[in-house]
Amino acid sequence: MIRTRIAPSPTGYFHIGTARTALFNYLFAKKNNGVFIVRIEDTDIERSKKEFEDDILEGLKWLGIQWDEGPGTGGECAPYRQSERMSSYTPFLRQLADKDLVYPCYCSKEELEQEREMQVLSKQPPRYSGTCADLSASQRAAMKSSGKSSTLRFRIPRNRVLSVVDHIRGELTFDTNTLDDFIIAKDFDAPLYNFAVVIDDYQMKISHIIRGEEHISNIPKQILLDEAFGFTVPEFAHLPLILNPDRTKLSKRQNKVSLLEYRTEGYLPQALVNFMALLGWNPGNDRELFTLEELEKEFSLERVNKSGAIFDLQKLEWFNAMYIRGMSLPELTSWCIPYLIEEGYIVREGESYSVSTDGRRLSQTELESIVRLEQERIHRLREIPHRLSYVFTQELEYDAALLIWKKTPVEEIKQGLLIAYSSLQKISADEYSPENLEDQLKKEIQSAGMKNGVVLWPLRVALTGLAASPSPFEVASVLGKKRSVERIKDAEKKLQFETGEK
């Protein structure tokens, strides 16, 4: 059975690159009726935090990536936190010691750094020289009795070429003469990454290791450990890096890197999944929009690129806008409500809401009508409060000059506002819909022999205080008759004040 895994370290918030790796592992497992596992690699006790683990697991759930085995789910290979698996590593370390495949290294960090500096100056590849590899038992005893701390290094066999076929990169070869004996544990009870991951992958029966290309250098180390224990070497697939637009490695200097930041900004999980899937993978045609369920059927490692994938924020915003436009109004409204509450525009009162400034009660239908105003215009949910501020604000602040359409004389603009005022007054509250407003107003404009812009432009500004907004008919319908005519009166006053009239 195909079994894949994502094994994040809870030393920071869920990284967008880790999320992409989790997605590809999940999709590959689902495409092949396999099992997707989440394993928390929390052996870095000082930096690992519960809040980071919670953020990772919550982020996966938010994206819709549900694991088959892992924390909170369990499974035949439990536990799924390395900190809870420590007792399982020691016997394997002892096996290596019995075969003389590991040895204690007493070199300090300072000594190792000095050694590397000398190698660089001598134009030699920086690697461990093997100072402690052949110490006698008495020399080791003397080092230990002197109080020197040690680590455990794995002996690299020399004069070998290791070969592996990567599902994305083809055949990869590694000369063991270029590798140095690497540290696999601080002691027999404290394994480090390259050792613990091999044991975990074996015990969890991982068939395919799908991860970022920065781990390619770990392949020979893990193969040699697999060989030392007689384990079957898993299959590998190394994903391309995610790059900034300038082709540097994705970093928070140019883009947000935490999934939490994108959630907070109002990106939808569907949009992020769709966007991340195309960071390095292509379907073989021009199609761009995929649901998670569709990706489960379409995904294949054969269509993952070798070259780096550009993180294009504008493209992500396009995806997000497309999913926002495709959502049902009730669903979109439920996503937008927390942002309106956070901005202080509305207050939750049991099952209903009220406007903070005047206490007006808002039904679900009214809230949906408000959100509908901007559904076709926003790219992120966080834009909603700013875009709809005119709906919740009592008095609009804008320059009277904004009411002027092109170079129309002020007197004509006043006449246009008067026509708008008259039209709105003629429509009863029961018939106060965008369609009726538009029909009535355009009849009045035609009867007066005026241009549409002379009436509709100042009406739009009077209702919203903005130069760009949804149609004035939709806005007027949402504001209601009373508030709409009051805003037209306020606009007239602004023009009078601007021209010095009383």
Image (tube, rainbow, N blue to C red):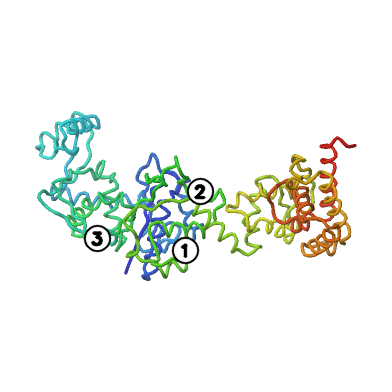
Q: Nearer the viewer, residue 386 or 110?
A: 386
Residue drawn at 39 percent across, 52 percent down:
40
Residue 356 makes an appearance in the image: no
- Amino acid at the residue labelled 2: Leu
Q: Name the residue tied to disc 1.
A: 288
Q: Where residue 228 sits in the image (x, y, percent)?
A: 17, 55
Label 3 secondary element: strand
Label 2 CA crowd tier, 10 Å (few <14, some 14–19, many 20+): some
Q: Where residue 89 sits in the image (x, y, percent)?
A: 27, 51
Residue 492 makes an appearance in the image: yes
How far is the residue under mark 2 from the one under mark 3? 35 Å
- Amino acid at the residue labelled 1: Glu
How far is the residue under mark 1 from the one under mark 3? 27 Å
Q: Nearer the viewer, residue 501 or 10?
A: 501
Please give left or right for residue 273 compared with residue 444 in the image. left
Looking at the picture, does residue 65 appear above or below residue 135? below
Residue drawn at 35 percent across, 45 percent down:
43
Q: Name the residue tied to disc 3.
A: 170
Q: Nearer the viewer, residue 53 or 477?
A: 477
Label 2 secondary element: helix
Asked if marks 1 and 2 touch (Cβ < 8 Å), the reply is: no
